[in-house]
Image (tube, rainbow, N blue to C red):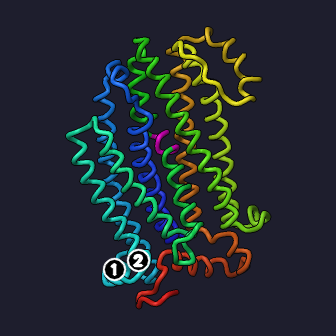
């Protein structure tokens, strides 16, 4: 049990750091106001400086998490303790599929760090964050290429969809973390200025659009991934993998409910308060929510509305961390499609086989597994 715990912690740590890094870059490119007038309202340089500091922390933590992942995977492959893996590291790095993916990740992190150094002198640049996001996507791909989705050893549809799923989750979940820790606190501290509250409404609306697109990607890829890994419906409650997936889905449904509340009630209220035209939305909104939004828009002032949104976003950020932890735990469970075939008595043995197959892809001697 302790050994499993040691292997799970680096994976949880890595996915939280990676999603925060990608979410920060997504916020920089698509959530922060692009026009100069809006930037002049706010201490925009303060947000960019804090954002760049967060990215530096994320990159350093990615170096640490990558090192821990390599150590724990090498221990799994060699059946050695973590402190005794040094002699087998060259074989792991240069003669296994996981090692190849890890080296690709290492190169991407180095380039990411170079991009950060260049961007530190040009915080107003859009090209540098876009460049960094590309290499963040490569790091995300290395996770998918060494997950259950890559059991076959060759790049194929499950692996690519797992990658898209992770990227979409990073834009939404990582963006929520960045909003709650950096962007919205700076904006809301300046809530005595009406123009700044209008900017709060703009930022909330822009993130709501990004989150909506990301959620669509999460749902589409998530349905396929669940079908691929679970196989049969009854496996959801008959296997540890399925039970963990159920917990993840329940958390996700709560997140969707809160996100919908912000998107269809809180954000329109902020936009109407800011004298923006009400954005036309789906038929359900026009039938049931538009009148409600209009009836309460004058009962709360802008500051109260902004703080309500802030509280909801904090809850969403906490829930997204729980969802990401569940996602990391799923990588250390036997996929339900395997579990039901081998039976409960052989589950632990199958877990070790699948984990090594996922991690290695090719044996130490270069032969296909």
Res 74 label? 2
Can residue 213 be seen at all in this image of the molecule? Answer: yes
Q: What residue do we see at 70% from left, 72% from top? A: 337
| Residue 179 in picture, x, y percent from top left | 45, 35
Q: Position of residue 28 (x, y in %)?
A: 38, 38
Which badge, 1 or 2, is on the more N-terminal residue? 2
Q: Is residue 355 magenta?
A: no
Most foreground residue, 99 or 291: 291
Q: Is residue 117 above or below residue 51?
A: below
Kindly indicate the quadrant of the structure image that contains residue 72. Answer: bottom left
In this figure, which residue is indicated by the disc labeled 1? 89
Q: Quadrant of the N terminus?
A: bottom right
Q: Residues within 10 Å of mark 2 (few under 14, many from 20)?
A: many
* CB under 8 Å between discs 1 and 2: yes
Furthest residue toward left: 121
Q: Is residue 267 above or below residue 77?
A: above
Query: Nearest the camera: 115 or 250?
Result: 115
Q: Main secondary structure of the magenta part?
A: helix
The number of numbered discs placed on residues in the rendered structure image is: 2
Question: Callout 1: helix, strand or loop?
Answer: helix
- What residue do we see at 45% from left, 17% from top? 197
Query: Residue 343: x and y, percent?
Result: 73, 79
Left or right placement of residue 322 versus residue 87 in this view: right
Q: Quadrant of residue 84?
A: bottom left
Secondary structure of residue under mark 2: helix
Point out the stretch of residues depicted in magenta.
172-177
Q: Does residue 353 appear to the left or right of 245 in the view shown?
A: left
């Amino acid at each position: 049990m302790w050994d499993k715990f040691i292997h799970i912690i680096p994976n949880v740590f890595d996915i939280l750091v990676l999603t925060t890094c990608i979410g920060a870059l997504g916020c920089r490119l698509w959530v922060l106001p692009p026009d100069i007038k809006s930037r002049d309202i706010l201490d925009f340089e303060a947000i960019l400086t804090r954002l760049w500091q967060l990215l530096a922390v994320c990159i350093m933590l990615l170096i640490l998490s990558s090192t821990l992942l390599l150590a724990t995977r090498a221990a799994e492959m060699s059946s050695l303790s973590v402190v005794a893996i040094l002699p087998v590291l060259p074989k792991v790095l240069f003669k296994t599929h996981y090692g190849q993916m890890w080296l690709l990740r290492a190169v991407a992190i180095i380039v990411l760090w170079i991009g950060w150094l260049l961007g530190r002198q040009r915080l107003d640049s859009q090209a540098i964050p876009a460049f960094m996001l590309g290499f963040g996507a490569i790091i995300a791909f290395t996770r998918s290429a060494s997950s259950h989705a890559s059991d076959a050893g060759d790049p194929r549809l499950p692996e690519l969809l797992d990658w898209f799923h992770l990227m979409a989750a990073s834009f939404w979940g990582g963006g929520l973390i960045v909003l709650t820790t950096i962007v919205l606190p700076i904006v809301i501290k300046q809530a005595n200025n009406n123009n700044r509250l209008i900017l709060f409404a703009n930022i909330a609306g822009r993130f709501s659009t990004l989150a909506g697109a990301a959620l669509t990607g999460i749902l589409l890829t998530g349905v396929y991934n669940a079908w691929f890994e679970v196989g049969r419906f009854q496996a959801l409650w008959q296997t540890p993998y399925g039970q963990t997936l159920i917990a993840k889905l329940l958390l996700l449904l709560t997140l969707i409910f809160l996100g919908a509340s912000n998107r269809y009630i809180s954000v329109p209220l902020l936009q109407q308060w800011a004298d923006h035209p009400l954005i036309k939305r789906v038929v359900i909104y026009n039938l049931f929510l538009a009148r409600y939004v209009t009836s309460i828009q004058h009962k709360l002032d802008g500051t109260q509305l902004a703080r309500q949104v802030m509280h909801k976003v904090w809850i969403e950020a906490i829930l997204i961390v729980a969802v990401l932890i569940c996602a990391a735990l799923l990588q250390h469970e036997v996929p339900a499609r395997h579990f039901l075939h081998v039976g409960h008595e052989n589950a632990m043995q199958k877990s070790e086989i699948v984990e090594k197959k996922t991690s290695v892809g090719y044996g130490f001697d270069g032969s296909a597994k």
